[in-house]
Amino acid sequence: MTPHPLIAGNWKMNGLHASLAEVAKLGALYQPSLQAKIELLICPPATLLAGAHEITAAAKIALGGQNCHFLETGPHTGDISAWMLKDAGASYVIVGHSERRQSYQETDALVHAKALAALEAGIRPIICVGETAEQRQAGMALSVVEEQIKASIPAQASSKIVVAYEPVWAIGTGVTPTHAEIAEVHAHAREMLKRLLGPTFGDQIRLLYGGSVSPANAKEILKLANVDGALVGGASLKAQDFIAIAEAYL
Ligand code: PGA
């Protein structure tokens, strides 16, 4: 059975203790009619995971980290392992977000190792891929995404893996690709996943679109073939906007 669509919120480096009130608001807005249709996930900063978990567990909202180390424990000052995220209540972790690929030179091989660690720890990796503006202009969008999928996704077939297509130029810019462009990349990614992981898992893996998703554009984007949800940055910070995106499925 194909799992429910996933609406995931990436808070990035935003949120203090007071922001837990927003999580509580989200819990109140995530009504059973919506729970029956979609899975809702928030990925707050690591400092808020434990506090958020007290609210999300009761509200049936999933919780995730934004990054993890590829090892379980050890002398890695400042790092957090997938096992620690799980211990704090997370059931997902974002790996290979373009902001990390760009700011910390995270390679496909490293993203692959992090995704594997997540699976070993028993949480679901959301593996991010996506081309830059220059790569799209050069006609390389499909080949870049193809390479990233091949090199970042653990070959071990698992429907626990989630893939997010996030064109770098659409993140935080208010600009989104055309529907045809999103559909083209998602169709190609689906084919790749089927080839790599076999038809069953290739079909079950949820393929999210991310990059300037908003209440205004969500309905049309989420209708597209092979789009099984969204990874939302800015619009996930306000419970009302985030829920409005999820309600595109009602
Ligand atoms: P955005 O971010 O929705 O603010 O564009 C998306 C993301 O980076 O995951």
Image (spheres, rainbow, N blue to C red):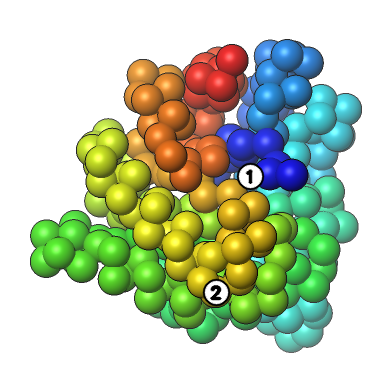
Q: Quadrant of the N terminus?
A: top right
Q: In the image, what residue type sits under mark 1?
A: Cys
Q: Quadrant of residue 197?
A: bottom right
Task: Locate residue 163, reporting x and y percent.
Answer: 53, 57
Label 2: how many Cα within 10 Å (few below 14, some 14–19, many 20+)? some
The residue at which mark 2 appears reads as 196
User: Can residue 152 be seen in the rendering of this structure?
Assistant: yes
Residue closer to the observer: 150 or 81:
150
| Secondary structure category for the residue under label 2 | helix
* Total numbered labels placed on residues in the image: 2
The residue at which mark 1 appears reads as 43
Looking at the picture, does residue 243 appear above or below residue 126? above
Q: Quadrant of residue 4?
A: top right
In the image: residue 4, left or right of residue 207: right
For marks 2 and 1, the one nearer the N-term is: 1
Q: In the image, what residue type sits under mark 2?
A: Leu
The residue shown at (47%, 44%) is 226
Task: Locate residue 124, reporting x and y percent.
Answer: 71, 58
Q: Quadrant of the C terminus?
A: top right
Residue closer to the observer: 4 or 164:
4
Which marked residue is nearer to the observer: mark 2 or mark 1? 2
Alpha carbon separation for disc pair 2 and 1: 28 Å
| Secondary structure category for the residue under label 1 | strand
User: Can residue 69 be seen in the rendering of this structure?
Assistant: no
The residue shown at (88%, 27%) is 58
